[in-house]
Image (spheres, rainbow, N blue to C red):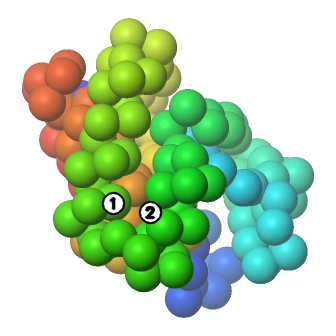
């Protein structure tokens, strides 16, 4: 099973949707806590759902269970914790939520991508989600678009 990830920051809409089409994405799973911010541009919830259907024939799903809490996000953004602390706290949160039991593997039976805002997966929770699921489910190839 392949799990794709993508961030929208520093990408033009053409680049973003072209990457999804090239990968054959049919389902986008939004793992952001806030998916309707004005800062999200073309990836605001309702706009993104429309663009995905029209441009990629893909469906949109928002799964806030795969997002960090405001406390974790704020502590990291305000430099109260390091990236390593963020990783540790978010991994513990996913374990506490038991996401491996609550996320249906069938979501990934079609090419599916985890969406967050960060331009690269290095310091983004979408990477942590995909790695956590790989650890719990096994047999996952992670592809960062």
Given residues 45 and 75, the one toward you in this image is 75
Residue 64 rendering spot, x and y as whole percentages: 62, 37
**What residue is drawn where x is 54% and y is 88%?**
10
Given residues 26 and 99, the one toward you in this image is 99
Which residue carries the number 2 mark?
A: 6
Q: Quadrant of the N terminus?
A: top left
Which residue carries the number 1 mark?
A: 86
**What residue is drawn where x is 42% and y is 81%?**
79
**What residue is drawn where x is 49% and y is 67%?**
75
Q: In this view, does 36 lie above or below 117?
A: above
Label 2: how many Cα within 10 Å (few below 14, some 14–19, many 20+): many
Secondary structure of the residue carrying numbered label 2: strand
**What residue is drawn where x is 44% and y is 62%?**
6
C-alpha separation, residue under disc 1 versus residue under disc 2: 19 Å
Res. 55 mark: none
Q: Is residue 113 above or below residue 102?
A: below
Residue 108 rendering spot, x and y as whole percentages: 40, 27
């Amino acid at each position: 099973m392949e799990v794709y990830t993508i961030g929208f920051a520093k990408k033009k809409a053409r680049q973003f949707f072209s990457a999804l089409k090239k990968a054959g994405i049919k389902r986008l799973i939004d793992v952001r806590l806030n998916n309707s911010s004005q800062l999200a541009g073309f990836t605001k919830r309702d706009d993104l759902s429309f663009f995905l259907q029209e441009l990629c024939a893909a469906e949109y799903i928002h799964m806030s269970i795969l997002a960090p809490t405001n406390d974790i996000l704020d502590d990291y953004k305000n430099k109260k914790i390091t990236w390593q602390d963020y990783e540790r706290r978010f991994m513990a949160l996913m374990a506490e939520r038991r996401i491996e039991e609550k996320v249906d593997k069938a979501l990934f039976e079609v090419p599916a991508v985890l969406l967050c805002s960060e331009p690269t997966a290095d310091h983004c929770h979408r990477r942590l989600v995909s790695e956590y699921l790989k650890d719990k489910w096994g047999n996952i190839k992670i592809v960062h678009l």
